[in-house]
Amino acid sequence: MAEDRSGQKDAYRLILEAIDVGVFKPGDRLVESDLADRFGVSRTPVREALQRLETQSLLSRDGRSLVVASLDHNQLAELYVVRCELEGLAARLAARHATSEEIRVLNDLVAEDWKLVDDPQALSRGNRRFHRQIHLASHNRFLVQQLDLVYRPMALMATTSLAAEGRGRDALQEHQAIVDAIAARDEDAAYNAFKDHISTAFVQRLKVDAEAPVSI
């Protein structure tokens, strides 16, 4: 349960986490009183949290209601462009700065994720852990902060591209190639491997979205 330093429940983080794990999906209407009851907080911090999430474009207006936002094609493309460059940089810096212990953790995460390869939702969570570990291994706090901001809109994707046939196995092989490059201290290889990984993920995401049913 998300709490602030005073021990009080953090309404913003509670709602953000609920969006992140798919409790609230794009298009879902969020009602202040319902959220207050659900999370056991007063309406004032919920109202402030909703305003903050709207400012961050994680919520949008549908008449007078607030709903969980969705990403259109252009927004999705913009997001992946930024991810590609920033995560490539994170891998480059990880190849330069990661400790031997951090590299061991990365290898362990890949090994653990192979056990989840037939469970797309669990694998998606493992994928986030792996990416986050590389962000931290860059040892650049400002880059980590920017990547945290970039990752927030990822919660607005209703499905994971890892559910596509064979994508989970391909993604884990790509993860291992990134770790191998970091372990070899090959900055260019780590940078390119991560950029290729994000580019491939974007292609798969576009295919998943193209196959989704269209409302007429």
Image (spheres, rainbow, N blue to C red):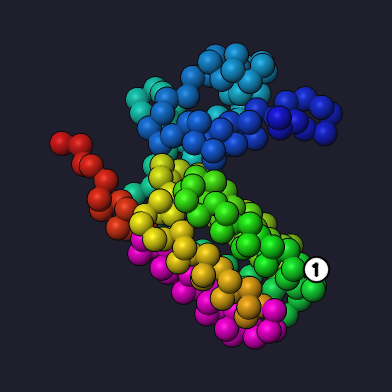
Can see residue 143? Answer: no
Residue at image coords 75%, 73%: 98
Q: The N terminus is located in which quarter?
A: top right
Q: Amino acid at mark 1?
A: Glu
Residue position marked by numbered label 1 in the rendering: 101
Give the image location of residue 45, x and y in percent: 66, 24
Q: The C terminus is located in which quarter?
A: top left
Residue at image coords 55%, 51%: 116
Magenta stretch holds residue 153 = no
Q: Which residues are magenta?
A: 183-204
Residue at image coords 54%, 38%: 21
Q: Nearer the viewer, residue 213 or 76?
A: 213
Q: Is residue 35 left or right of residue 120?
A: right
Q: Is residue 136 left or right of residue 67?
A: right
Res 108 quadrant in image: bottom right
Res 141 quadrant in image: bottom right
Give the image location of residue 61, x and y in percent: 40, 31
